[in-house]
Image (cartoon, rainbow, N blue to C red):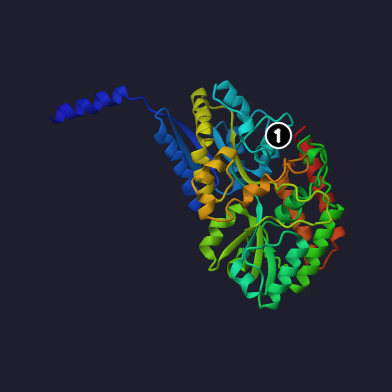
């Protein structure tokens, strides 16, 4: 009987064909990493020919630089997750990238870029509209507010500020009722330069914010950003605005109730709900009403998936199938609902709406309403600057000098623009 069982196992093994394994290097740990792994395992369970194998490779910069180094050593994975500010670097990696639009065409997989959100795909497309990478985790900046503190201040808890002057007045009322600070922000450059500018349809660089060529120059020292930074510096003195640091370091100020409002990533929603002991409200980013045409639309942050060359053809066939799977409305809706990232297609948004997700979670659709408020323009479809991670550091360093009273807004922005352009020229020279 044992012999018969072994024979059965051997026969079954001989008849089964091993699935083609495809490594996916990524930069998501904790709960988000668990959700990413579930997407991979669900795809693997949906068919038997391919197996996506997620591999955590550290932070976004570590995952990107690790993949580039692995490519040079011919040890690269087929798929890597790269943060949005690494887009120019990936595009400049000549011969290393297999553009997604080519992959889908050459693998005969159905693919229509018009079914994706233009405000998302524009960030990852060339000037002809061809998608170079696959949008995966995209977020945008929105306003969060503490409804309990609004009630205490005599403010309507269902009416967030729409403009910066309204936000200023509400912040003063919050402070008058005992709240220490009016508002804070996450990701200082992303909120107070990049999204501020897109939201007001103002360019921050020449050549379509860098999308039209490496010979782009920053134009961040302009009247809009200068007047906004001047206001931030003025508000910092009385804590109408209170700077909390780079990336998401300001979060504790909002979680604890020290600040009544916060402007940050839509993907921060889950963390806020997990940490805040108050009724949470949502609103769009405020705008300056004197700017004609505002508000326009906000731009994304997050990351996309890049396909690297040099792998066996079978892996690319599997990746094309995986991208089709990721584009399904039910898969995208699940990812959006679980993480707070944007659905990348209108069909996924409609799917979540039909499920009743937004009715059960009021405000969870603010991000997509804000992203699709108007068709994106050359100033609001995204940006693509070489060495932008370093440029962001420069911008934030100069903003910090302004808030500390060490420099005027104009002097700081002039310096940030000059230092940023020096980095752009070095990047251009290295990638000609």
Residue 273 placement (x, y as % from top left): 53, 61
Q: Give residue 133's position: percent from left, percent from top.
A: 62, 34
Q: Camera-side residue: 263 or 7?
A: 263
Q: Is residue 76 visible?
A: no
Image quadrant in which the C terminus is located? top right
The residue sitting at 18% across, 29% down in the picture is 5
Could you tell me which residue is drawn at 75 percent across and 67 percent down?
168
Residue 122 image point, x, y percent: 69, 37
- Looking at the image, residue 161 sits to the left or right of residue 226; the answer is left
Q: Residue at x 55, y 48 (%)?
A: 58
Q: Which residue is mark 1?
A: 92
Q: Residue at x 41, y 33 (%)?
A: 46
Instruction: Please state which of residues 18 and 110 is positioned toward the viewer in this rendering.
Output: 110
Q: Quadrant of the N terminus?
A: top left
State the SS at label 1.
Answer: helix
Identify the image quadrant of residue 99. Answer: top right
The local crowd at label 1, few if under 14, some if 14 to 19, many if 20 or more residues have their Cα within 10 Å, is some
The number of callouts visible is 1
The foreground one among 324 and 148 is: 148
Q: Would residue 74 be visible to someone looking at this image?
A: yes
In the image, is residue 250 above or below residue 102? Answer: below
Locate residue 321, reporting x and y percent: 50, 29
């Amino acid at each position: 009987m044992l012999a018969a069982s072994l024979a059965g196992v051997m026969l079954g093994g001989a008849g089964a064909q091993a699935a083609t394994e495809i490594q996916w290097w990524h930069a998501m740990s904790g709960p988000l990493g668990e959700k990413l792994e579930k997407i991979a395992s669900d795809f693997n369970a949906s068919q038997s020919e391919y197996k996506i194998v997620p591999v955590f490779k550290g932070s976004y910069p570590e995952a990107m630089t690790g993949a580039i180094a692995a490519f040079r050593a011919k040890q690269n994975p087929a798929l890597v997750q790269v943060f949005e500010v690494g887009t120019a670097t990936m595009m400049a990696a000549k011969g290393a990238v297999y553009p997604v639009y080519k992959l889908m065409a050459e693998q005969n997989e159905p693919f229509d870029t018009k079914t994706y959100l233009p405000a998302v795909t524009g960030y990852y497309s060339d000037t002809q509209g061809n998608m170079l990478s696959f949008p995966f985790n995209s977020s945008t900046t929105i306003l969060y507010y503490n409804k309990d503190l609004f009630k205490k201040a005599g403010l309507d808890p269902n009416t967030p500020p729409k403009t910066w002057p309204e936000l200023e007045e509400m912040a003063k009322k919050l402070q008058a009722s005992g709240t220490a600070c009016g508002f804070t922000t996450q990701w200082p450059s992303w909120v107070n330069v990049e999204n501020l500018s897109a939201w007001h349809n103002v360019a921050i660089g020449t050549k379509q914010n860098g999308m039209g060529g490496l010979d782009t120059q920053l134009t961040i020292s302009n009247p809009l950003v200068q007047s906004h930074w001047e206001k931030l510096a003025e508000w910092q003195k009385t804590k109408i605005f209170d700077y909390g640091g780079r990336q998401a370091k300001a979060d504790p100020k909002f979680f604890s109730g020290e600040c009544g409002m916060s402007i940050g990533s839509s993907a921060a929603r889950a963390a806020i709900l997990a940490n805040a002991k108050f009724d949470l409200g949502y609103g769009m980013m405020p705008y300056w009403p004197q700017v004609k045409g505002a508000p326009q639309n906000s731009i994304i942050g997050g990351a996309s998936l890049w396909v690297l060359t040099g792998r066996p053809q079978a892996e690319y066939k599997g990746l094309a199938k995986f991208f089709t799977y990721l584009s399904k409305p039910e898969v995208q809706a699940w990812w959006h609902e679980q993480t707070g990232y944007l659905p990348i297609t209108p069909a996924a948004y409609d799917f979540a709406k039909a499920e009743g997700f937004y009715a059960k979670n009021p405000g969870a659709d603010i991000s997509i309403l804000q992203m699709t408020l108007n068709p994106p323009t050359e100033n609001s479809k995204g940006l693509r600057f070489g060495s932008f991670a370093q440029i962001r550091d420069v911008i934030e360093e100069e903003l910090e000098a302004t808030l500390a009273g060490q420099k005027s807004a104009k002097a700081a922005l002039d310096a940030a623009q000059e230092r940023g352009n020096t980095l752009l020229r070095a990047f251009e020279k290295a990638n000609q």
